[in-house]
Image (cartoon, rainbow, N blue to C red):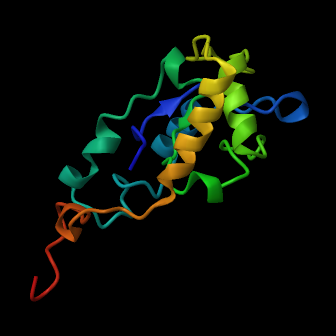
Amino acid sequence: MFTNQSFHNIGVQFRGPVSAEQGRIAGVKSLVKDEFNCASKYSDAKPEQCSELKFLRTSGRDLLGAFKAPTLRYLSKSGPYMHNGSLKTLEDVTWHYRTTPIAGVGRTELDPFVITDTEFVQLEKFLLTLDGPIAADPKYLRSPNKPPPRGY
């Protein structure tokens, strides 16, 4: 899927009046307190189905200002970019990584990304090749907990 399904602080938080945006750390705290989460008395889930909630990290510097990395598939069609829509074009995104901005909250994970102008253009062109469909047998794309369809 061209994502690591993880959360990262790459310095994309809003600045100014809405700069209190905290990222993953605010989300996990809210989830744990939510009376309707998987482990609540209102949930139909069995306790063993809520293991992610049970082992969820609720503190740590790496959660501050971190947002989930989306898939790179169909990248050319998913703008504006970043969790907050702050980068309008794919070129803006690649420049973001190239300039290594300081995080508005927490600490950025980005290291300086030094590439030539030619490599910069090549990177953008490569990212545009990820617009194709997933070429995999459907059995590899279904949830491991979901039975295959009839006649499969």
Residue 10 in view of the camera: no
Toward the viewer: 123 or 23?
123
Q: Most extreme residue toward the left, as rendered?
A: 151
Q: Position of residue 109 (x, y in %)?
A: 55, 17
Q: Most extreme residue toward the right, as rendered?
A: 17
Q: Could you say which quadrant of the image residue 144 lies in?
A: bottom left
Q: Position of residue 45 (x, y in %)?
A: 27, 62
Q: Most extreme residue toward the front, as rendered?
A: 118
Residue at 14% in and 76% down: 148
Toward the viewer: 122 or 112?
122
**From the viewer's perspective, is residue 106 above or below residue 4?**
above
Residue 4 in view of the camera: yes
Q: Position of residue 3 (x, y in %)?
A: 42, 42
In the image, taking residue 105 as reference, residue 126 lies left or right, namely: left
Q: Position of residue 72 (x, y in %)?
A: 50, 47
Give the position of the C terminus as an image quadrant: bottom left
Residue at 84% in and 28% down: 15
In the image, taking residue 109 as reference, residue 38 lies left or right, namely: left
**From the viewer's perspective, is residue 74 above or below residue 7?**
below
**From the viewer's perspective, is residue 134 above or below residue 128?**
below
Toward the viewer: 10 or 2?
2
Toward the viewer: 7 or 63?
7
Residue at 57% in and 34% down: 123
Badge count: 0
Residue at 24% in and 66% down: 142
